[in-house]
Amino acid sequence: MSLTQKLFSDVQPLLRTICDHPFNTALCNGTLARDKFIYYMQQDSLYLIDYARALAMVGARFTTEKDVALLLDFSQGALIAERGLHEHYFQFFEVTPTMKKGPACMMYTSYLVERAATANLGEAFAAILPCFWIYNEVGKDIVKRSQSPNPYEKWIEVYSGDEFTEAVNQAVALTDRLAEESGRAEREKMTEAFMISSKMEYCFWDDAEHRRQWPV
């Protein structure tokens, strides 16, 4: 069993909780409140800047041209393809981006950038993987249950689509290769990083559901 096979098996209860979260259930049904989706998109636009930064930081640490190019493609994709999705909805709902990170966004991005800067390569990339894999799983789960017309159909199409799925498959394969090149202690750190980021994915959705602000 590869490392990612074990990770994906272990995280199934959390993944199901994320897919069944009230935010994603309403998004699937097309009944998600406008203000909740706007909060989510504003936070996600801030998140992606640091996510792209973390990808570029990790990419710079690889030693082969192929791996460096792949990570830079991931980073560029986060800034271009997904930012295009944000701009679509900002125009659709006639709102502007925010410059203020909420609690979950701040926690998650700080963790990713810190791991990218200080952790071993395998651990740093394992922390990045959940954003790829969980979004793809959520997108595929929603597309099976969603019906058109849905105001959030474009979001569903992006994260369930073939292009994003291919990027996820590449990220999974790279994670397994890094695990194969690592010792037991490093694989344990990779597992911990993956699980922490997966929990932060839940927190991000939950912040959007409650439009959570800083308490003070």
Image (cartoon, rainbow, N blue to C red):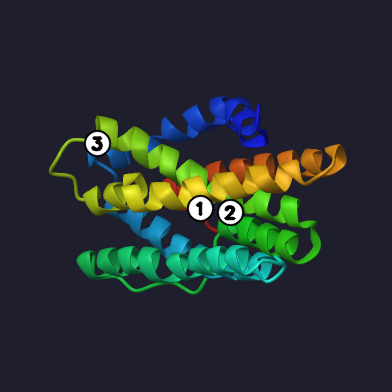
- Residue at 29% across, 47% down: 156
Mark 3 surroundings: few (<14), some (14-19) or many (≥20) residues within 10 A:
some
Disc 1 to disc 2: CB gap under 8 Å: yes
Q: Amino acid at mark 2?
A: Ala
- Residue at 43% across, 33% down: 19
Mark 1 surroundings: few (<14), some (14-19) or many (≥20) residues within 10 A:
some
Residue where numbered disc 3 is placed: 29
- Give the left or right position of residue 185, taking residue 66 as reference: right
- Looking at the rendered image, the disc whose residue lies closer to the viewer, 3 or 1, is 3
Q: Amino acid at mark 3?
A: Asn
Q: Which is nearer the N-term, disc 1 or disc 2?
A: 2
Q: Which mark is residue 212?
A: 1
- Residue at 41% across, 39% down: 138
Q: Quadrant of residue 52?
A: bottom right
Q: Is residue 104 visible?
A: yes
Residue where numbered disc 2 is placed: 104
